[in-house]
Amino acid sequence: MNVTAFSTQGFERSFLQRANQARHQLTLLDTPLSADTAHLAQGALAVSIFTRDDASAPVLGQLWDLGVRYLAVRATGTDNVDLAAARQLGLRVANVPEYSPYAIAEHAVTLMLALCRHLRQADQQLRANDFRLDHLIGFDLHGKTVAILGVGRIGGVVARILHGFGCELLGVDVQPNPELTAQYGLRYVSLAEACAQADIISVHTPLNADTQHLISDELLRQMKRGVMLINTGRGGVLDTEAALRALKTGQLGFLGLDVYEKEKALFFADHRQDLLLDDTFARLLTFPNVLLTGHQAYLTREALANIADATLASLTAWGLGQPAAHEVAAPVAQKQPVA
């Protein structure tokens, strides 16, 4: 098939080409998909997108009118895809449900360790020839209570890693996994109980109507004073303005983010010559107890290879007239473009 892949980064293109094995005609664009760029898929039967792409109903309608019939998402989350509109159109959609839970989980724990041992400040001091230790006193992870919000594949790996550190584990999930309780002593509790007891909270929930700004002023007030909050899930789960208010009062003691609710305007691009116009993000950067990374938790060789393999497997299945292994939207009877 002719495939147009939007938002491809230089580091992932070799993985996509290797996984393709010349089976499909790939057009790899660094341009994000939007209403203004959908025309670039002219002539393609399939499109591949990433998290910053706009796959809303109007854009999907444009793609359908261009002849696109398949959409392969190079990520687990599909919150940027209007799946109802895709089904109405008859557009088949697949994602990559599991590419490397280890990559995300290990990055989450990396943020915890870097924050609790003040590694950002320590590095800055050393580079300025300041070898004092006065302001670098950290704390042990051992014995701390960690709440995992969303105990799926990634959350389960986080539990395994932190069990090795000797942490007390709490889990918040609508579908408890008894194996995690048996193996790691993870205890499932309510969200309110997790907030009241946890020294560290790690967020791994998907973004949907129920989790949008789940972590709000109200929920932050329920947490222990000085709590550490880590989010490697979806930026919109955290109300960033609420987090800033909690940082100012000391209610939030540490914040580690790999995702940001307005990241589409910032991440995956070089803005060195641009003014930083996002005041919220700029204020986050002023706090020494905040550590930010630019949606790089998934960025390991293993994860990139798995994403490419799964994406190309979906495209190949469709090219053979078969359903993809990880379809999240399949056609319904009506196949008219969505207005």
Image (tube, rainbow, N blue to C red):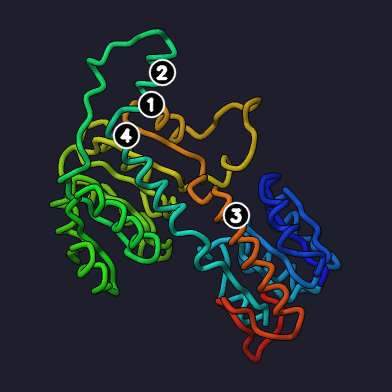
Residue under pointer 3: 304
Query: Circle 3 — which element?
Result: helix
Q: Which of disc 1 and disc 3 is earlier in sequence? A: 1
Q: Is residue 156 left or right of residue 167?
A: right
As displayed, is residue 64 above or below residue 280?
A: below
Disc 4 crowd, CA 10 A, few/some/many (<14, 14-19, 20+)? many
Estimate the x, y position of residue 33 in percent, counting from the top left: 69, 56
Q: CA distance from mark 2 to mark 4?
A: 14 Å
Q: Nearer the viewer, residue 23 or 79?
A: 23
Q: Amino acid at mark 1?
A: Arg
Q: Residues within 10 Å of mark 3 (few under 14, many from 20)?
A: many
User: What residue does disc 1 label?
Assistant: 120
What residue does disc 2 label? 124
Rendered view: 201 above or below 153: above
Is residue 243 left or right of 276 when viewed as pictured? left
Q: Can you give x and y, in whole percent of width and height, for residue 161 in the image?
A: 31, 53
Q: Quadrant of residue 142?
A: top left
Q: Amino acid at mark 3?
A: Leu
The residue type indicated by label 2 comes to Gln
Q: Pointer 4: what residue?
A: 115
Answer few, some or many: residues within 10 Å of disc 2's Cα (few below 14, many 20 plus, some between 14 and 19).
few
The mark that comes first in sequence, 4 or 3, is: 4
Alpha-carbon span between mark 4 and mark 1: 8 Å
Q: Residue at x 59, y 61 (%)?
A: 306
In the rendering, at what x and y percent does residue 7 appear? 68, 52
Determine the secondary structure under disc 4. Answer: helix
